[in-house]
Image: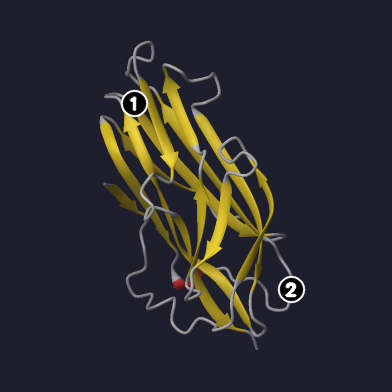
Amino acid sequence: MATVSAPADTGRGQYFDDPPDDQIVIDVVTVNGSGCPAGTAAVAVSSDNTKFTVTYSDYVALVGVGAGALDFRKNCQLNLVVHVPQGFTYAIAQADYRGYANLQRGASFTERASYYFQGMSQTTPISHSYSGEMDDNWQATDQVEVTQLVYKPCGEERNFNINTELRVNAGSSNTSTTTSFVTMDSTDADFKTQYHFAWKECP
């Protein structure tokens, strides 16, 4: 498996200590983008309230044989309402993006993602790139330093927005006889896109 990580603050300590005990519920308000047609994206919260998972069933970018003119780039925009217990708020401390790639020699792909609370500044998009020849699962992890964590303001209702993108570059591969593609999520049930909570009590 190909794995890359964004730089992290090694002294950040544990983000996930003492999450609230009450159930966290996430409502999907809107889903837009070529990578997540209606009915193909789902969200679930872990039983220990440390993270939530986004599952995609039709998020595929490709070039070459069988690809349309716009299939080289796919994106998805999710708008979520995260219902948290009274007295708590949250930030996203880590995001794990996972999928599967089959790239011909000379081809490459880039995964790009950002997220933000409604009405607040968007996080700087972080990109990860991989080059072929490749036929394997991939994973990219983005970690946030403690000093850079952005918490939802206490007592305010703000939707949470997630933007992701997959882009395949044919490069020197022969697109007349071969296909290169990348997916967000894989056929492996353990490979999911996950967002890890950092919890904080409100004053």
Is residue 10 shown above or below 141? below
- The extreme top residue here reads 176
SS label for mark 1 = loop
Residue name at image x 59 percent, y 73 percent: 24
Q: Are marks 2 and 1 in contact (CB under 8 Å)?
A: no
Instruction: Judge by depth and name the residue closer to the eye, 115 or 124.
Output: 115
Instruction: Judge by depth and name the residue closer to the eye, 139 or 112.
Output: 139
Q: Position of residue 112 (x, y in %)?
A: 48, 44
Q: Position of residue 169 (x, y in %)?
A: 41, 26
Q: Which residue is mark 2?
A: 156
Q: Which mark is residue 68?
A: none
Q: Is residue 23 visible?
A: yes
Q: With 52 as the anchor, is 155 left or right in this view?
A: right
Q: Quadrant of residue 79?
A: bottom right
Three-letter code for the amino acid on which mark 2 is drawn: Glu
SS label for mark 2 = loop
Q: Quadrant of residue 87?
A: bottom right
The quadrant of the picture occupied by the C terminus is bottom right
Residue name at image x 52 percent, y 26 percent: 71
Q: Which residue is mark 1?
A: 107
The residues bearing labels 2 and 1 have C-alpha atoms spaced at a distance of 45 Å
Residue name at image x 36 percent, y 68 percent: 9
Q: Position of residue 130 (x, y in %)?
A: 33, 38
Three-letter code for the amino acid on which mark 1 is drawn: Ala
Is residue 165 shown above or below 94? above
Task: Report crowding for label 2: few under 14, some 14 to 19, many 20 or more residues within 10 A (C-alpha).
Answer: few
Q: Position of residue 37 (x, y in %)?
A: 62, 38
Residue name at image x 30 percent, y 50 percent: 3
